[in-house]
Structure formats: C-alpha cells, structure tokens
Amino acid sequence: MSAARSGDFSLADYDRRVRRRLLVIAALLALALAGFALDLATGPASLSPAQILRALFEPAALGRGLVSIVWDVRLPVALLALAVGAALALAGAEMQTVLDNPLASPFTLGMSSAATFGAALAIVLDLALPGVPQGWIVSANAFLFALGSAALLQMLARLRGVGGPETVVLFGIALLFSFNALVALLQFVATEQALQQLVFWTLGSLSRASLDKAAFIGIVVALVFPLSMRAAWQLTALRLGQDRAASLGVRVERLRFLALARISLLTGTAVAFVGVIGFVGLIAPHIARLLVGEDHRFFLPASALAGAAVMSFASVASKLILPGVLIPIGIVTALVGIPAFLAIILTSGPRG
C-alpha cells in the first residue's frame, strides 16, 4: 500500500514539474512577443500603438510614409531579431550539450569568426559569386565560411582516437584566433571605404533587415527545430555522461555529428545576415537551464524563446540608449553578455 502511495506521489510530482516547465515556456513566449511589440513601437519616428496596428492591418487608412516606416523598417528588424535570437540560442544550447562545456557557443568556438572572415573577403576583394545577386554576396560568402568551419569541427569529432569534446573545444578556440588574425590582416590592407563596411558588419547590426531575410532565417529555424526535438532524449542522456549515454543505446559520435550539422546551419544563416552577435548563444541556454532544467524536451524550446526575447530587448535598447542613433546590436549584446559571461565562469565549479 505504501509503495502504491509512493508511486502516486512520484507521478503527481512529475506532473507538477511538467506543468511548471510548460508554464515557464509559455511565459518566455509571452516575453518574446512583448519584446517584439516593444521593438515595433520604438524608433526615431513617434508612432502610437494605434497607428502601428492600423499600419499592419489597415495600411490603406494611413499615409504611405507611416506604412513604409512600419512595414519596411520596423517590422523586418523586429522579426529578424526574433529569428536570429532563436537560431543562435538553439545552436548554443545544442553545442553546450554535445561538447559538455557550459562556455561553448558558436561565438566562442570560431564559427562566427569564420563567417566574419568570409564577409571580409567579399567586401575587401569585391567578390562575385555565380548565380548570387550582388546584394547577397557578403551574406552568402559569410554563410559558406561558417559552414566550412563547422565542417572542420565535424571532421574532428568523427576522427577516431583524437579525443573527446575537449579536443573539439580546443580546436574551435584555435579557429577563433586564426580567423580573427586573418580578419585583422584584411582590415590592414583594405581601402578606407571597404574598411568602414567591414567594421560596421563585424559589430553586428539589424539595420539591413528585410522581410525576405527574416523569413529565410525563420524557415531555417522552423526546419531545424523539429530535428533537434527529435534528438531531445538522446541529448538529455548525454548530460549524464558520454559512457552512460552509450550504455543507454545512444550513438554518441553520430549524435555529435548531427548536432554540429544543425549548429552550423543555424549559426551560418544567422551570422550571414546580421554579422557577429556575441553572447546570445551563450547566455540564453543558461537562462533556460536555470528555469526548466536539463530535460531537453523543455530546455531546447526554452533556449530558443529566451534567445528571441534577449535579441528583441537588445534591439529595443540599441534604439533607446542614444536617442536618434541606432547602436549596432552586437555592442549591446556584448555589454550585457560580458558580466553574465564572467558570472558563469565564477559559478561553474569543477564537477564532482
């Protein structure tokens, strides 16, 4: 009888934890939507909420100028912030799990630096790619180099006898410094005009947002997210340790390879359109982990929503810190992320 009661209490406790985690995810979704709405409402032009709603749903009732501000400027920026934040946070969540490193992220392991080098090549050398429109050359080259750096990480992860995730982390750090040095070399030889473009791009910015770019990243996230959720239980098992996961039937090498493929696609797409956005892929998964724990059925969606919310509010801050001046969003995320990064280092002690 006591065993049956204990089982009932366990099931009831599990149901309570599941409901609490679902409520947290719903709250993060509401927070991301609030950030989106606030992003639409802020900007140099003073627009009331009623004007914004009418521009979105009754554009014929307003002047062409107001409609253009909402549809051509604010809406693309707000949507792009959500999509990029979700992409980088989801990539960071998977990377921290498969590499078993709380400080791992696309930014710290060289993928963003590789994308920066690809963009720098396109800007400084004025490259032309066959079949690619001129306005997409920089983004396309950044995307290709991000995928290339991820492919190197994948190859290393699949090599036998090379080592565990620690080796991949060290290799990623080597990539980070290598590509940063190459970017510095290109900056040294670039013309003044190319240098201005390159510096602005490397700071990370949503100013070149468009609806098609936001839709492209959104589609990538929508395609990758179900694949990540499909591997959620394997990723959760991996948090118990590589040997324990293998004993449960998880093919660790294959899991890591597929995860890095998803990470490279998310990171390459995001960085290619907005430049280098640091710390979102690092901080958002830690926020989600504190709120919902390690169960990846809840951790992955919570990370994506936390990243979307962080980017949306960072976009708002980039417009409000200096009225009339749009600060590159990479600066805002760095100012917020550096203290959080130091807090993670100080609170991440050795595992017993």
Image: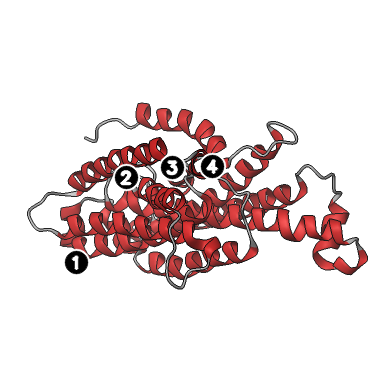
Q: Which mark is residue 109?
A: 2
Tell me whether circle 1 and circle 3 mark residues in contact (CB < 8 Å): no
Answer above or below: position of 253 versus 168: below
Residue at screen point 69% across, 39% down? 319
Upstream in sequence: badge 3 or badge 2? 2
Give the foreground label among 4 and 1: 4
Give the foreground label among 1 and 3: 3
Upstream in sequence: badge 3 or badge 4? 4
Kindly identify the amino acid type of the residue bearing the numbered disc 1.
Gly
Cα distance in 3D space between marks 4 and 1: 56 Å
Q: Secondary structure at mark 4?
A: helix
Colour mapping = secondary structure
Task: Find disc 1 in the rendering and name its residue.
Answer: 249
Kindly identify the amino acid type of the residue bearing the numbered disc 2.
Leu
**In this picture, residue 120 sits left or right of residue 57:** left
Characterize the local packing of mark 3: few (<14), some (14-19) or many (20 or more) Cα atoms within 10 angstroms. Answer: many
Cα distance in 3D space between marks 3 and 4: 39 Å
Cα distance in 3D space between marks 1 and 3: 27 Å
Cα distance in 3D space between marks 4 and 2: 30 Å
Q: Secondary structure at mark 3?
A: helix
Characterize the local packing of mark 4: few (<14), some (14-19) or many (20 or more) Cα atoms within 10 angstroms. Answer: few
Q: Nearer the viewer, residue 196 or 301?
A: 196
Residue at screen point 60% across, 66% down? 212
Kindly identify the amino acid type of the residue bearing the numbered disc 4.
Gln
Task: Find disc 4 in the rendering and name its residue.
Answer: 193
Upstream in sequence: badge 4 or badge 1? 4
Task: Find disc 3 in the rendering and name its residue.
Answer: 286
